[in-house]
Amino acid sequence: MTIRNGSKADAGMIGTISFEAHSLCNDWSERCPNVKAQDWVEVQKDLVLQHFDSANDIVVVAEDDKGEVVGYVFGRVLGKGLPGAAKKKSLEGQNTVALGKMSNAGFINSLIDKYGKILWIRDFGVHPDRQGSGNGKALMNYAIEEARGREVNIGLAGASEAVRLYEKLGFVEMAPARFFEGSTIPMTNLMLLELFPIAAQGAASGDRA
């Protein structure tokens, strides 16, 4: 396994792996009941390509011994005075009511208010055939080291299936899992890895200045 910075040439494969991984999540049938694989891949590819715009973006991939991409993580440092989150295109077949329940903006803003800036993980996935082999842990550890180098904490909205992995890496659940109305299937969990607790004090001092 090799972990490396991603390139624009990886965007299509990331989109494909994203569909393969997300479509196996427990909430898929409620969140994306009529989404076609090709449409998902194209929308996700466009989203990935937006994460090569500045030094605030990270795109990381895992390769197997044959050089094939088998997993990915990408995100952006968000904060006051920094570019906002990338805009995801609308996707035919998604349950817009369920998506409304999954809005992450309030959580992101609360982290920015507290810390000044945050590395927001926009998406993370490993091909189902390669899960359980350490690829996901290696990708997230790479992202964590990126955050350390930038002196920021990490926030994400994780699928319920990945919560155990996030917790092993030190993430803490900041809000209960969100549910679609009338459903018992959890959608996503809002989580934080606080690498720099003192950042909150620094952000507060800067606000007062």
Image: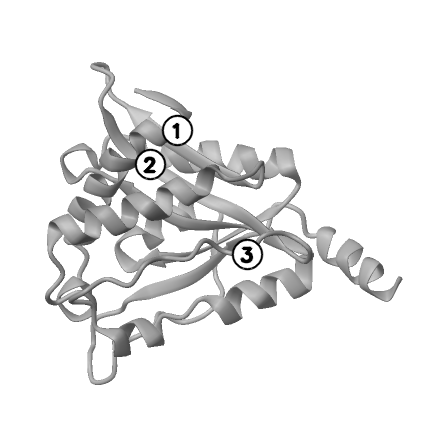
Relative to 170, 205 lies left or right: right
Return the x and y of residue 95 as percentages of the image width and height: 21, 73
Question: Which of disc 1 and disc 3 is earlier in sequence?
Answer: 1
* Residue under numbered circle 3: 84
Residue 162 visible within the image:
yes
| Front of the two marks 1 and 2 | 1
x 26%, y 69%: residue: 186
| Viewport quadrant of the N terminus | top left
| Viewport quadrant of the C terminus | bottom right
x 20%, y 76%: residue: 184
Return the x and y of residue 63 as percentages of the image width and height: 28, 23
Residue 35: quarter of image: bottom left
* Residue under numbered circle 2: 72
CA gap, disc 1 to disc 2?
A: 8 Å
Return the x and y of residue 6 as percentages of the image width and height: 39, 29
Question: Which of disc 2 and disc 1 is earlier in sequence?
Answer: 1
Return the x and y of residue 130 as percentages of the image width and height: 19, 32
Report the residue that reaches farthest toward the top. Answer: 66
